[in-house]
Image (tube, helix red, strand yellow):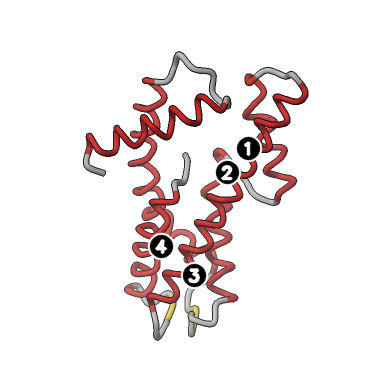
Amino acid sequence: MRLFASKALPIAQDAVRALLKSESIEAESPNEVIADVEAVLKSYVETEREVSEKTRDLLERTGRGNAEFGRVKAQIAESKGIKVGDDMLDYLLDQVVEAFHHSAHVDEIFAQDHELRRAMVPHFKRHLAVDEGLDAEVRLQLRHLQEGTRTWDVEYARVMEAVRRKRGV
């Protein structure tokens, strides 16, 4: 799974509205709570981008192949305090729940943390699954390039935009 910055707002809107509707949280200004969640998600996207850049730079400097990209990225992400790959969803849910506890815009939390997480999972997965399909299609078109290289990143962004336009996403 991969989180794209363009999905931060829709995920935040769906998750917060679901929690408000189920009365798991209470907020006078839901738009501010949505903005808080969106900020958490965008912060993750930015940090993950920095981790990817550091990983590429490290692999280039040390002369190691891109076959180690995933392992090295996970180590650098851990040093930055984030999770990537399969652990990303749990990490993001934890961060959002923590944001609810610290947000001045959330007036009351009526549900326990695990209930909040459980209520948000379908909304995260629905939006991330759409991107997973796009991601698979883009990766299929880029199989001739080595993942983790700068060329791959540039082409990935270009092809992703073309696929999104084609699908109307």
What amino acid is found at the position of numbered circle 3 in the picture? Asp
- The disc, 4 or 2, on the residue closer to the chain's N-terminal end is 4
Look at mark 4 in the image and give the residue it sits on. Answer: 12
For residue 132, which quarter of the picture?
top left
Q: Secondary structure at mark 2?
A: helix
Q: Residue at x 59, y 76 (%)?
A: 102
Look at mark 3 in the image and give the residue it sits on. Answer: 36
Question: Disc 4 or disc 2, which is closer to the eye?
Answer: 2
Look at mark 1 in the image and give the residue it sits on. Answer: 53
Look at mark 2 in the image and give the residue it sits on. Answer: 49
Q: Answer yes or no: do the residues labelled 2 and 3 have beta carbons within 8 Å? A: no
- The disc, 1 or 4, on the residue closer to the chain's N-terminal end is 4
Q: Answer yes or no: do the residues labelled 2 and 1 have beta carbons within 8 Å? A: yes
Q: Secondary structure at mark 3?
A: helix
From the viewer's perspective, is residue 165 above or below residue 5?
A: above
- The disc, 2 or 3, on the residue closer to the chain's N-terminal end is 3
What amino acid is found at the position of numbered circle 2 in the picture? Arg
Question: Disc 2 or disc 3, which is closer to the eye?
Answer: 2
- The disc, 3 or 1, on the residue closer to the chain's N-terminal end is 3
Q: Residue at x 46, y 63 (%)?
A: 38
Count of numbered marks: 4
